[in-house]
Image: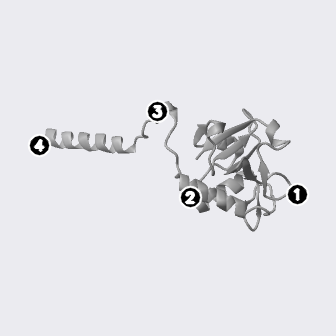
Amino acid sequence: MLTLRRSTVLWTCLLLAACSTTPPPAPGGSRPSLVSAEQSRDAAIHAMGLVGTPYRYGGNTVDGGFDCSGLIGFVYRHSAGLATPRSVAQLAAFGNSIPRNDLRTGDLVVFGGSRPTHAGIYVGENRFVHAPSTGGEVRLDRLDGAYWSRQRVDVRRP
């Protein structure tokens, strides 16, 4: 009887351990996206609707204003129920790295390379929404614009 009980406990522990492990990465080292293509499109549309909202360092609400990571967090929380990292440095490692030529609406564009300094949400047609600086407001800019085309950009797909 004791051997049967130990065997049952062992199998239960193994089953629970198997249920709690992280699935292996997909081929190529990337994990499955945390959001669907439809949720990504919804996030891009939501972000465009926030153009004109005042910039505020540390801001993460419509009423209080946004900084760049606060804007991304607000949009993804309300559009897809997804909590995103709060700092640009953390966003630079969030989700999957995507080649720039595979950009789709809702992807995150993170500027600055190994020392990330800014981020936005890609909305299509080489444009992105971001909260750029103190005294400014959330705006729509082009990746191929005079300033942004000179910046190192990495793409992350939540």
Q: Nearer the viewer, residue 24 or 154?
A: 154
- Mark 3 lies on a secondary structure that is helix
Q: Quote the CA–CA distance across marks 4 and 1.
A: 74 Å
- Mark 1 lies on a secondary structure that is loop
Of badges 4 and 2, the one in the foreground is 2
Q: In this view, does 153 lie to the left or right of 136?
A: left
- Measured as percent of width and height from the top left, residue 66 is found at 75, 58
Asked if disc 4 and disc 2 are in contact, CB closer than 8 Å, the reply is: no
Of badges 2 and 1, the one in the foreground is 2
Amino acid found under the numbered disc labelled 2: Ala
Amino acid found under the numbered disc labelled 1: Gly
Amino acid found under the numbered disc labelled 4: Met
Residue depicted at x 73% and y 34%:
113
If you read the primary sequence from the N terminus, does the residue marked by circle 3 or circle 2 appear first?
3
If you read the primary sequence from the N terminus, does the residue marked by circle 3 or circle 1 appear first?
3
Amino acid found under the numbered disc labelled 3: Pro
Q: Mark 3 points at which residue?
A: 27
Q: Which mark is residue 135?
A: 1
Q: How crowded is mark 2: few (under 14 residues within 10 Å), some or many (20 or more)?
A: some
Of badges 4 and 3, the one in the foreground is 3
Q: Please determine whether, in this image, residue 114 is positioned above or below residue 9.
A: above
Q: Quote the CA–CA distance across marks 3 and 1.
A: 44 Å
If you read the primary sequence from the N terminus, does the residue marked by circle 4 or circle 3 appear first?
4
Q: Mark 2 points at which residue?
A: 80
Of badges 3 and 1, the one in the foreground is 3
- Measured as percent of width and height from the top left, residue 135 is found at 88, 57
Report the number of discs. Answer: 4
